[in-house]
Amino acid sequence: MLSRSRFNPIYKASKRELRLLTVVRRNYEYEHQYGLHLEGKAIQGFRPADSRSKFLESFHRLLRMLTTFYRQDDDTTVKADAFPILNGLKEVHLILSEGAHNQYGDLPSVARIEMLMQQWILSRPEFREFLPTRTMVAYPEPWMDCVDAMKKVQGWSDTSVVHFRNLAVFGEQLLLSIRFGHWSDVVEPTSAFNWARFWRPQVQGYIHAYWAVTAIYLHDGEDGPVNATLPSVLLRQRLDNQRRRV
């Protein structure tokens, strides 16, 4: 049984649920900022007025060019060409800057505050005692074992929350460095060369996490157009396949 001192924060958070950002409102902002939208029963009659429909394709093309760049950079007999990286950075920067209005300055901050509160509540020791968590797994953050436990109870995706967390952390770092860099004014590839080398761990970590979550590997071995299928569609397909195997 939860003690009164521990119960109060959880009770207060549940009382504030009606004032939290709704799934529909978040979905419209995802579409407006990144051209991404959710799948599920909570999204009905979705009609966005403005969308960054080219973002995912441009970002994935940049990641593919980065894998080619890293392969060349590792070869001491080849001088890696950073001009494609510079052009890719300019394209992604342009698309991101087009969506920097509407609720750009407010909604992300509110969403971050709400998420941090939820993570803090999930990291409380009483939740670990209540949910059948895997204590032997070394999660990077204390709230993650409860999320995996709840996913197991609800029959959701069996992909570890570690990969989703890595997507969020690495993706945020990469997109912030692109969004707030003055890439539209850069003409020399030296800046893109240094950017690619500096962010290499995050780029390769993001590519691996995206493969673990969606089964799509964003590498330079593929010819033809970039896979720009929405992650929500890929997640829905994997969940359907998972349930058919059970």
Image (spheres, helix red, strand yellow):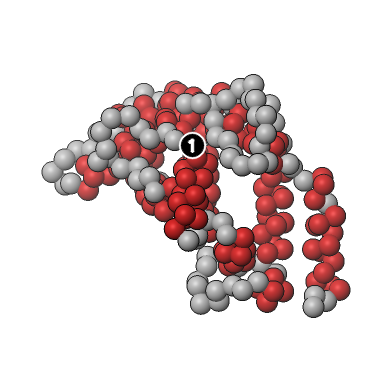
Q: Quadrant of the N terminus?
A: bottom right
Residue 85 screen position, x and y as percent: 34, 33
Q: Amino acid at mark 1?
A: Leu
81 and 29: which is toward the camera: 29
Q: Is residue 222 visible?
A: yes
Q: How many marks?
A: 1
Secondary structure beneath disc 1?
Answer: loop
Is residue 100 in view? no
Q: Measuring 31% from the left and 42% from the top, which residue is drawn there? A: 219
Q: List the single residue furthest toward the left.
A: 77
The residue at 83%/51% (across/down) is: 16
Residue pointed to by mark 1: 230
Percent coordinates x, y for residue 21 in the rendering: 74, 42
- Report the front residue among 190 and 14: 14
User: 230 left or right of 28?
Assistant: left
The front one of 34 and 181 is 34
Instruction: Please report the residue visible at 65 percent of the width from the left and 71 percent of the height from the top.
Output: 131
Q: Quadrant of residue 61?
A: top left
In the rendered structure, the answer to whether residue 240 lies left or right of residue 24 reads left
Q: Is residue 21 above or below residue 32?
A: below
Residue 223 quadrant: top left
Residue visible at 61% across and 74% down in the picture: 132
Q: Nearer the viewer, residue 237 or 204?
A: 237
Say left or right for 219 vs 28: left
Mark 1: give few (<14), some (14-19) or many (20+) Cα within 10 Å: some
x, y percentage for residue 104?
66, 32
Reply above or below: 19 against 137: above
Expressed as whole percent of the image width and height from the top left, the position of residue 240 reads 49, 49
Q: In this image, 6 relative to 35: left or right?
A: right
**Quadrant of residue 49 within the rendered picture:** top right
